[in-house]
Image (tube, rainbow, N blue to C red):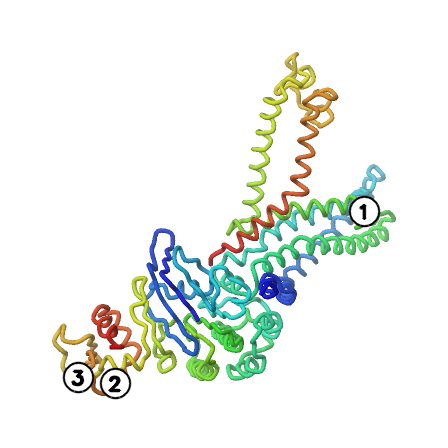
Amino acid sequence: MEARMKKGFFSPKRFSQLLLRDFTSGYRATLISMAAIAGGVLLIAVLTALGIALSGGGQTPDAELYFGLFTNVMFFGGFIVSSLAFKEAHQGGSGIFYMTIPSSTFEKFASKLLVTSLGFAVGTLVLITATSAVSEGVVRLIFGFGFGFFNPFSRTVLELVGIYLIMQSVFLMGSLWFKKLAFVKTALWIAIFGVVTLIVAAAAVRILMADSITWDGIHFGGNASGEVFYNWSEETVMKSFGPGTRGAQGLEAFKIAGKILFIGVLAPVCWLASYFRLGEIEV
Amino acid sequence: MIEIKDLSFSYRREKLFSKLDLSLEPGNIYGLLGKNGAGKTTLLKLICGLRFPKTGECRVLGFTAAERPAHLMEEICFISEDLYVPPIVPSLFERIYAPLYPRFNHAAFQEYVREFELDYAKKLTEQSAGQRKKFLLAFGLASTCRILLMDEPTNGLDIPSKTQFRKLLARSGADDQIILISTHQVRDMENLIDPIIILDQGQIIFQEPMQEASRRLSVSMEREAPPEGSVLYADKTLGGYVVVRESGGGEETNIDLETLFNTVIGNREKVGRIFKGKGA
């Protein structure tokens, strides 16, 4: 009975069929997007190199060019793809078709998650690595200099992939919550959430840690001499609290809590909420 | 087995079903009839878990439909009127979706594809609406699911395809299958759907085999219009009137689906009384 129930919750056979479905249903659009990205990378590299060549040595090649392109493609592209992941579930005909596919809610959710998170990140890594290699060859052949090869295994790249995997869970959840314009609406909600969090955090610091703030160093609005204080970098704020004060300890605790929430809590909460939301969708 | 008990459902503030009861047994091709907006499609959606009841329950093959468990979805095929198909060729569709139906009959599917004269090489989205419908019908029939739900299956089919569909449906129905067809095209489904379920104002007002309907109601062709109130239903037709009365217990007369539907819809209470005492 238990085995039967487990099989009902997750079956590798059904899951692989769903993955096959997700990969094949949008393969044409994927190929077109990949071609456009590859062309874009090549064009940007050539134009940038041309600009450097024409400047007559006034500019130096940007060693981070491909890294920057990779970051933009993975984050913007990935968030858009994630926002569209469950679009079919909200529409009349395709919604009926999708929701009646013989598979569990977990299998449906997990297949979309895998494709839009790890699948998209790995796909982007492979695409940018291959395209940048070709582009680098072309640029070196034409201009005699290059930007340096893109290293998909560098620590920074892998860290960025990790951040993408966490953040895309929010957009995946948005695709289940919003029937239309999921990307825009999710981005808007993130912005609103950010502003509210900032206001609450500022108010909390003002109320709870007021006694530990060195007022000469930092004021919410201006310092003692009336000079407006703009530098809110961690270093400056920490310095203003003074070492070992309650404020400094509080800020450190706030940082750790933020990291735990971002790394360990955000994605699982979004996944869980998405899973339950998918189970509640009516067509 | 489909068991609906005390089910209520509404779209926002608009109440559709209130305390609905329905029980469907395997081995039948049920016909679901009703006026526009009666809730036929919604009922099909409730059965396959696409809509959730507000109160009451809808159990299908022992599962709660709204939970959409994989084991239940493997046994339900819903051919909706919307005709959505993914942009892939039929062979790939079969490769992706057929393994998800444990009882899928590939040989039968190939046979249906041949009989419907479907283009197996052309993308489904590039085929005509009729071709798409035939493909989905062929796939649905070949799935041999224990619950086969069809919403207006003959809409958009040409005349030979309708004939073909009737033949295939009559041939493919298994003893452990419940086939439920919602339709307005009653002439297309004549002699195929039985028992008949009629849905009106959120209630099942009629659920009887055609044989019972023929036994309980008598149909005759009369030259003159019958006095109002003396019959259950009268409709002017070529050369006279089709008149439906309560049968006096004489010979069974064949009643066509359209006449039966109009009789039931026009005389809910009288027809209800006539059929209520059938077992006595």
Q: Which circle marks residue B147 in the picture?
A: none
Name the residue located 20 percent from the left edge and 71 percent from the top edge.
B270
Judging by the rendered image, the residue that carries numbered circle 3 is B222
Name the residue located 49 percent from the left edge and 58 percent from the top edge.
A91
The mark lying in front, picked from 1 and 2, is: 2
Left or right side of B144 for B275: left
Q: Is residue B230 above or below residue A270?
A: below
For this orientation, the residue located farthest to the left is B227
Q: Are marks 1 and 2 on the same chain?
A: no
Evaluate whether residue A24 shows in this view. no
Q: Point out residue A218 in the picture as x, y percentages from the top left corner.
A: 67, 19
Q: Chain of mark 1?
A: A
Q: Which circle marks residue B253 in the picture?
A: 2
Along the line of sight, the residue nearer the viewer: B72 or A184: B72
The mark lying in front, picked from 2 and 3, is: 2
Left or right side of B113 for B279: left
Name the residue located 87 percent from the left edge and 49 percent from the top edge.
A144
Judging by the rendered image, the residue that carries numbered circle 1 is A154
Task: Name the amino acid, label 1.
Answer: Ser
Q: Chain of mark 3?
A: B
Task: Name the amino acid, label 3.
Answer: Glu
Name the image quarter holding residue A23. bottom right
Quadrant location, the N terminus of chain A? bottom right
Q: Chain of mark 2?
A: B
